Image: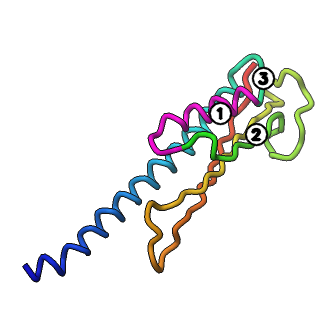
Amino acid sequence: MVELALLLPVLVFGLIGGADMARAYALQLAVQNGARAGAEAYAIDYSKNAGQAVARARQEMGQTPGMTSGAPAVSIRAGFQADGVTACTVSPPTVDDPCFVTVQITYTFHTLIPWPLIPNTANFDRSTTMRLFY
């Protein structure tokens, strides 16, 4: 009984810590999937609209349990050339002069329990760049 009393807190903290790690991994994947879905919605959709891409990214992230889709910051940078700086000059883009869109999502993860001696927050910053199709 003494051994169980000494070991039980370690087991409980291990289980809760494992659950926090699993949550962090799932939310990190949700952020990446949201960035990919938003970039795809902007790149493929014929009515280019940043609002639709943000809505699609939030919808994709909202499918993950435990994530509030309104919390992540979503930014879209569209219509730039392969160097990442120069604005697109040809509309619609051609094979010789392609244009790209980047969707970047920032999400702050908070652990379930404020653990001592370890960080209790993590920033997940993910971005996806896709070529625009017309």
Category of crowding for the residue at label 3, using alpha-carbon neighbours closer than 10 angstroms: few (below 14), some (14–19), many (at least 20): some
Label 1, secondary structure: give it: helix
Q: Name the residue nearer the viewer: 104 or 8.
A: 8
Mark found first going from the N terminus, 2 or 1: 1
Q: Residue at x 65, y 33 (%)?
A: 38
What residue sits right under mark 2 in the picture? 76
What residue sits right under mark 3 in the picture? 48
Category of crowding for the residue at label 1, using alpha-carbon neighbours closer than 10 angstroms: few (below 14), some (14–19), many (at least 20): many
Q: Is residue 2 magenta?
A: no
Label 2, secondary structure: give it: strand
Q: Amino acid at mark 1?
A: Gly
Q: CA distance from mark 2 to mark 3?
A: 12 Å
Q: Are marks 2 and 1 in contact (CB under 8 Å)?
A: yes
Q: Residue at x 77, y 18 (%)?
A: 47
What residue sits right under mark 1 in the picture? 38
Give how far across and how far down residue 105 sits, in percent. 66, 46
Give how far across and how far down residue 112 sits, in percent. 44, 60
Q: Which mark is residue 126?
A: none
Category of crowding for the residue at label 2, using alpha-carbon neighbours closer than 10 angstroms: few (below 14), some (14–19), many (at least 20): many
Secondary structure mostly seen in magenta is helix
Q: Amino acid at mark 3?
A: Lys
Mark found first going from the N terminus, 2 or 3: 3
Residue 129 falls in which quadrant of the image? top right
Q: Name the residue nearer the viewer: 19 or 29.
A: 19
Label 3, secondary structure: give it: loop
